[in-house]
Image (cartoon, rainbow, N blue to C red):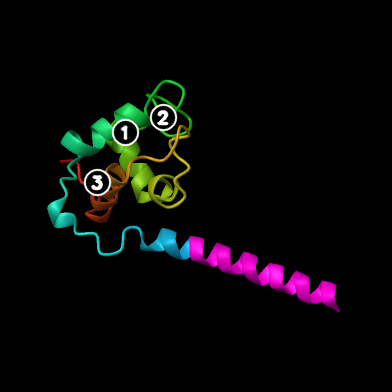
Amino acid sequence: MRKINLMLSMLSLAALVVGVGVACKKDEYKGLDCSSINAKYSSNIKPIISANCDGASCHGSGSKKGDYSNYNGLKAASDNGSLSSSVLTKKSMPPSGALSLEDRKKIKCWIDSGSPNN
């Protein structure tokens, strides 16, 4: 009986830790005021992507993983949700480590505004 209670306690603690982690991720962009963030493709988003994503081995010109070297390729990733999922939510891209919160906020605001070519 003690083993069962111990296992249930451990499972409850694990669920709590996972739940708190998920809740924290969801709140990261809560209340984000995009009116105060410059998120234009040509002057803000493209330089972030060029420096972190569109190298020859990743999302460069002609990449089968998605070509982020031009607006149309990045717009497609924005439209299908893969950019938001991998960069903003999972933070699994770039593989070298998550972008800074400042850069992620710019990308979030750009996506939320319809990912314009501006």
Position of the C terminus by quadrant: top left
Contact? badges 2 and 3 (CB < 8 Å): no
Of callouts 1 and 3, the N-terminal one: 1
- Give the amino acid type for the residue marked by disc 3 in the picture: Lys
- Give the amino acid type for the residue marked by disc 2 in the picture: His
Of callouts 2 and 3, the N-terminal one: 2
Q: Is residue 69 visible?
A: no
* Residue with the most extreme right position: 1
Image coordinates of residue 5 in percent, x first then y, are: 78, 76
Residue highlighted by disc 2:
59
Task: Find the distance from the CA under tag 1 to the CA under tag 3.
Answer: 11 Å
Disc sitting over residue 106 in the figure = 3
- Give the amino acid type for the residue marked by disc 1 in the picture: Ile
Image coordinates of residue 33 in percent, x first then y, are: 19, 59
Q: Is residue 21 left or right of residue 107?
A: right
Query: What is the secondary structure assignment of the residue under circle 3?
Result: helix
> Alpha-carbon neighbours of circle 2 within 10 Å: few (<14), some, or many (≥20)?
many
Q: Nearer the viewer, mark 2 or mark 1?
A: 1
